[in-house]
Image: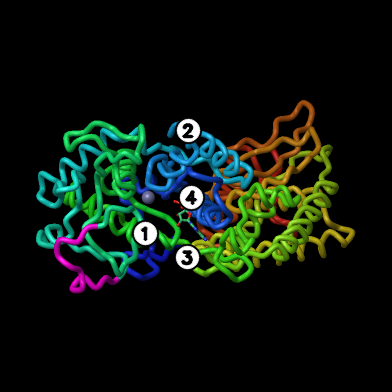
Amino acid sequence: MALKLFNTLTRSVQEFAPLAATGKHVGMYCCGPTVYDFAHIGNWRTFVFADLVRRTLEFSGYDVKHVMNITDVEDKIIKRVRENKTTLREFTGKFETAFLEDLEKLNCKKPTATPRATEHIKQIIELIEKLIARGVAYKAADGSVYFSIEKYRGCGCCYGQLLKLNLDEMRAGERVASDEYEKESVADFALWKARVPDDGDVFWPSPFGDGRPGWHIECSAMSIKALGETFDLHLGGEDLKFPHHEDEIAQSEGATGKPFVKFWLHGAHLLVEGKKMSKSLGNFFTLRDLLAKDFTGREVRYLLLTAHYRETFNFTLDGLAGAKSALARIKECLEKLVEFLDPNLPHTTVAPDVEIINQFKAALEDDLNISKAWGVIFGWIRDLNRSMSQKDFTSNQAAIAIGTWKTLDLIMGLNFEIKVPARLKENTVEMQGIAPFTGFAAKVEGEESVPHEIQSLVVARMQAKKAKDFKRADAIRDELKAKGWVIEDTAKGPKLKKV
Ligand code: AMP
Ligand code: ZN
């Protein structure tokens, strides 16, 4: 099965295929934090969602370049810099560091690149110059440069690709200077904002005069620089569809004349105790607030990963307490499995529970059906607990289960520490079409463990058998034999012996 995702651009679930001719490389951009405060739990829902998308793509065998920008200059930041009587870099640096620390606490993979807007002023200016040259941007009487929606549409381009806009109600010549506005006030938006006294020291020289970039152009410039003029995936919270993402499309396509992004993915919002988060309601949480209440990053990650990304999620402290007990069930099972591992056994075949991994993969490939994926995991844990309570549960079965968990956790990212006996050697097996499977093989004094290549063949044979391709399964058995290994099918899975 191929990965399917809901594309906001087409309003439909579509099969994902990368643009790159290699069929392997994927460019993904997620709008990052505006570093004027600590990221709140709603922001974290979106960033954990981005981490899930990246991990799922990697699980499906893609090589992902994951770019997440740091918005370190925009309206709200400048206001806070002024209020705090500090410098831009000092102010934003503190929150950027906190953001990266929190990202790690939530076990999110560090993006491949985290570009800062202030380090892309040159690219921003070049992009605006292109838009002026193409006649879709103009300098207004207030000294700022605006994007002209009328001229853009006049070139046959579409404004309103991500949502329906009533452009007939738009009044000609209307402009918005602020970065955030409602779709009812659609108007020409600022690309470059002329310096005003309130900006203090925050300005850069440009051919259009001293000033600073608008928020939307920052993301166009950074994403194009990192991923090219057309790339695979662009993500963000649903509130960013308009105006931010719509404006990103207009600026990018207006400047390059090429389609900007193939797949737009939007995560639904997070509510807290059924309401929009707000400081006055006392339901506003940063990750730090939750850690101070003795919850862990793992628990928060788990809870944020329990709901489908396109459904509004209601975050509650009770829900977070429930996450603790769900995680305890997984942890207990893993600890019991470790007790079954016997480091003194001779060669143990490293083969994952292909059935479980395939069920799990199929759930995620279905537009990231996370509830189904957790269902597979908890069903598997229930069965394992049952099997472990029976006398004939073997060390090999435990090794397979632990390895299977490690494979599942490549996506869930719970990172439980698994203390395996020191003499067990970890092996990674490349599986066709599935992410590398990490399992264990017993290392016996004086003997080598099963070579990588042989393990891969064992896994490939299991997959062939599952697909009822017995011809291929037999051919692999012969290949193993030629390499000096005999494979025997037993009730507990394939056994491998050196001849
Ligand atoms: P910001 O730092 O405000 O630019 O937001 C960073 C990301 O968090 C954006 O992708 C927003 O769409 C997302 N976001 C903001 N509030 C929420 C929320 N309550 N639930 C989910 N995502 C949110
Ligand atoms: Zn953005």
Please state which amino acid type lies under the numbered disc 2. Thr
**Residue occupied by mark 1:** 264
* First in residue order: circle 4 vs circle 1: 4
Quick check: 19 left or right of 365?
left
Asked if the residue at tag 1 contacts the one at tag 2, i.e. Cβ–Cβ closer than 8 Å, the answer is no
Spatial CA distance of label 2 from label 1 is: 37 Å
Residue 130: quarter of image: top left
Mark 3–mark 2 Cα distance, whole angstroms, equals 45 Å
Relative to the observer, which residue lies in front, 381 or 87?
87
Q: Few, some or many C-alpha atoms within 10 Å of disc 1 (few <14, some 14-19, many ≥20)?
A: many
Q: Which one is earlier in the sequence, the residue at label 4 or at label 2? A: 4
Q: Give the extent of the magenta segment.
A: 164-175
Return the mark for residue 291. none
Q: Alpha carbon of mark 4 to alpha carbon of mark 2: how far?
A: 36 Å
Residue 100 image offset from top left, x and y in percent = 55, 39
Q: Is residue 470 magenta?
A: no
Residue designated by label 2: 86
Identify the residue position indicated by label 3 in the image: 367
Mark 2 and mark 1 lie on one chain; the one further toward the N terminus is: 2
